[in-house]
């Protein structure tokens, strides 16, 4: 808990800091998720948590998928492509805080709208 408390003190939201100072972090059912979400957002921008839909690659990735992989590897050199069940989409995945995350950069075609 000391490493988590240190990270929260240095980077956490006011809500997380208050949970720690009021000794409610370990008593709250969602505090760890809030911490993990905030940490992911700060340390791995454009990544989100993966879920159980991640599967084996059945078809070869598109050039766009490889471009995303190259972009993802700027921050996470060990990122790999995975295809998700029910889709034909290959996305870069990695591990963060012991969980799988998926690289999801903002859509550059709609950013300036």
Image: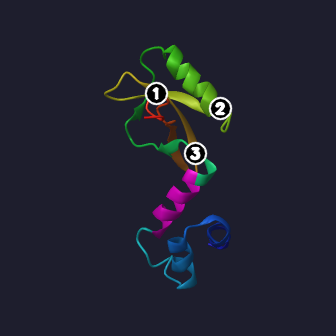
Callout 1: few (<14), some (14-19), or many (20+) C-alpha neighbours within 10 Å?
few
In percent of the image, x 54 and y 41: which residue is there?
46
Mark 1 residue element: loop
Callout 3: few (<14), some (14-19), or many (20+) C-alpha neighbours within 10 Å?
some
| Left or right relative to 14: residue 70 | right
- Mark 2 vs mark 1, foreground winner is 1
Give the mark, 2 or 3, whose residue is nearer the N terminus. Answer: 3
Q: Which residue is mark 1?
A: 109
Q: What residue occupies the far left of the structure in this picture?
A: 86
Give the alpha-carbon distance from disc 2 to disc 1, as whole Å: 22 Å
Main structural element of the magenta stretch: helix, strand or loop? helix
Q: Relative to 82, does residue 52 appear above or below in the rendering?
A: below
Q: Measuring from the top left, give residue 55's x and y in whole percent.
A: 42, 30
Residue range of the region highlighted in magenta in the rendering:
31-41
Q: Is residue 32 magenta?
A: yes
What is the quadrant of the C terminus in the image?
A: top left
Q: Measuring from the top left, give residue 7's x and y in whole percent.
A: 65, 66
Determine contact: label 2, label 3, CB under 8 Å.
no
Q: Relative to 76, does residue 38 appear above or below in the rendering?
A: below
In percent of the image, x 46 and y 32: which residue is there?
107
**Res 97 seen here:** no
Give the alpha-carbon distance from disc 1 to disc 3, as whole Å: 18 Å
Q: Measuring from the top left, give residue 72's x and y in whole percent.
A: 60, 33
Of residues 9 and 82, the one nearer the viewer is 9
Give the mark, 1 or 3, whose residue is nearer the N terminus. Answer: 3
Give the alpha-carbon distance from disc 2 to disc 3, as whole Å: 12 Å
Mark 2 residue element: loop
Of residues 109 and 37, the one nearer the viewer is 109
Q: Which residue is mark 2?
A: 73
């Amino acid at each position: 808990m000391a490493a988590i408390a240190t990270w929260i003190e240095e980077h956490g939201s006011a809500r997380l800091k208050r949970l720690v100072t009021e000794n409610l972090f370990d008593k709250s059912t969602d505090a760890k998720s809030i911490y993990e979400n905030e940490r992911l957002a700060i340390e791995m921008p454009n990544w989100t948590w993966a879920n159980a839909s991640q599967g084996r690659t059945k078809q070869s990735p598109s050039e766009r998928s490889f471009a995303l992989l190259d972009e993802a590897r700027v921050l996470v050199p060990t990122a790999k492509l995975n295809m998700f069940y029910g889709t034909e989409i290959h996305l870069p995945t990695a591990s963060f805080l012991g969980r799988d995350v998926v690289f999801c950069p903002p859509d550059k075609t709609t950013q300036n709208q």
